[in-house]
Image: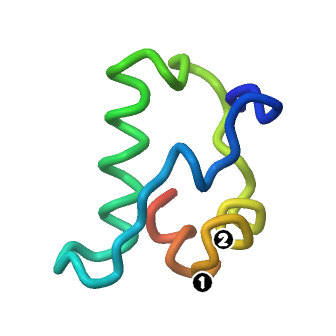
């Protein structure tokens, strides 16, 4: 995962429930953007579903859908 000493998931991901874009899609898009920008090195493991859900304060099923 990205160096958590420098970044927490809540600083890397901006989830907006009112954006009209499903939250799972926001996660997918933001992971792709982080990889493309080099902020999340390709091949680096994603956090666990539980960790992502807890830190972003979203449902674990939503994270699971994004990871599928």
Residue at left offset 55%, top offset 68% = 63
Mark 2: few/some/many CA within 10 Å (<14, 14-19, 20+): some
Q: In this view, does 7 lie to the left or right of 22?
A: right
Residue at left offset 26%, top offset 84% = 18
The image's mark for residue 53 is 2
Q: Is mark 1 on a helix, strand or loop?
A: loop
Q: Position of residue 31 (x, y in %)?
A: 43, 42
Distance, label 1 to label 2, CA atoms, is 6 Å
Pick the front one: 17 or 49: 17
Residue 21, above or below 1: below
The image's mark for residue 15 is none
Quarter holding residue 60: bottom right
Mark 1: few/some/many CA within 10 Å (<14, 14-19, 20+): some
Q: In this view, does 65 lie to the left or right of 26?
A: right
Name of the residue lying farthest toward the right: 5
Q: Where is residue 35 in the image (x, y as percent from the top left)?
A: 42, 25
Residue 60, above or below 2: below
Pointer 1 or 2: first along the chain: 2
Q: Where is residue 64 in the image (x, y as percent from the top left)?
A: 56, 69
Residue at left offset 37%, top offset 73% = 23
Q: Residue tagged by mark 1?
A: 59
The reply to whether dot 1 and dot 2 touch (C-beta < 8 Å) is yes
Name of the residue lying farthest toward the left: 20
Q: Quadrant of the N terminus?
A: top right
Quarter holding residue 2: top right
Residue 46, above or below 22: above
Q: Is mark 2 on a helix, strand or loop?
A: helix
Residue at left offset 68%, top offset 36% = 7
Quarter holding residue 46: top right
């Amino acid at each position: 995962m990205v160096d958590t000493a420098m970044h927490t998931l809540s600083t890397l991901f901006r989830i907006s429930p009112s954006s009209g874009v499903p939250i799972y899609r926001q996660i997918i898009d933001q992971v792709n953007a982080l990889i493309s920008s080099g902020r999340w090195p390709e091949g680096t493991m994603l956090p666990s579903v539980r960790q992502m859900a807890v830190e972003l304060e979203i449902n674990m099923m939503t994270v699971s859908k994004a990871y599928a």
